Image (cartoon, rainbow, N blue to C red):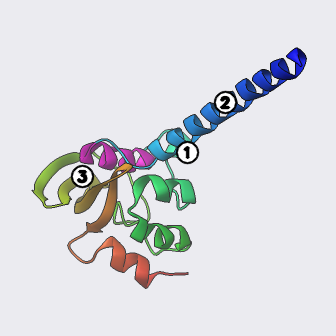
Amino acid sequence: MIRLRAKRAAMAKIVGTILVFAIAVLETSAAAAGFRSPESLVRNVYAHYGDGSSDLSNGLPHDTATARQFFDPSLRAAWISLKTKPYDFFVQSTTWKLGAISISILRKQFDKTYVVVAFDNKGRAVTLNFIVVNGPDGWVIADVESPHDSLRMFLSQHRN
């Protein structure tokens, strides 16, 4: 009888430990989506356009993890499905060598924040307006506007 109680207590501890671990993993993966500020979100987008390691020099990846971390749910599927593209929307070119990146909050309007990004790409000035929202997991991209179109239009035009 005492051994049975001891075994049950040990099993309860093991199950409790597993549950705590599972909850921690779920919270960590939920925290991986989104960013703490609009500026941090945009900085992290452009961290993928460097000259350094191959992981951070190929542009923003079109995978599920990246889509979940950077984009509003309404853009995620379109971002993942884009395989062939005429150019990279975030640098407005097929190649890049970016100069200094300027990030500033243009305005906050209701649930959206408009962030202006300006940089030089191989001698050509580029300005984009990020429309970001603060969801339950942090700041994510709702859309990005260029002088010619938006990320939503670009993704819908180049569906695969």
- Which of 130 and 53 lies nearest the eye of the viewer? 130
Q: Is residue 100 left or right of residue 15?
A: left
Identify the residue position indicated by label 3 in the image. Answer: 119
Label 2 or label 3, whichever lies nearer to me, is: 2
Identify the residue position indicated by label 2 in the image. Answer: 16
Q: Reply yes or no: does residue 46 show up in magenta.
A: yes
User: Mark 2 and mark 1 in contact (Cβ < 8 Å)?
Assistant: no
| Amino acid bearing label 3 | Phe
Q: Is residue 143 left or right of residue 159?
A: left
Identify the residue position indicated by label 1 in the image. Answer: 55
Q: Helix, strand, or loop for circle 1? A: helix
Q: Which mark is residue 25?
A: none
Q: Is residue 57 left or right of residue 151?
A: right
Any part of residue 23 in sight: yes
Label 1 to label 2, Cα distance in Å? Answer: 38 Å
Q: Helix, strand, or loop for circle 2? A: helix
Magenta stretch prevailing secondary structure: helix
Q: Helix, strand, or loop for circle 3? A: strand
Q: Is residue 46 left or right of residue 58?
A: left
Quadrant where the C terminus sits is: bottom right
Q: Which callout, 1 or 3, points at the residue further toward the start of the chain? A: 1
| Amino acid bearing label 1 | Asp
Label 2 to label 3, Cα distance in Å? Answer: 51 Å
Q: Give coordinates of residue 71: x percent, y percent.
A: 40, 60
User: Mark 3 and mark 2 in contact (Cβ < 8 Å)?
Assistant: no
| Amino acid bearing label 2 | Gly
Label 1 or label 3, whichever lies nearer to me, is: 1
Q: Give coordinates of residue 59: x percent, y percent.
A: 47, 55
Q: Which callout, 1 or 2, points at the residue further toward the start of the chain? A: 2
Magenta span: 37-49
How many tags in the picture?
Answer: 3
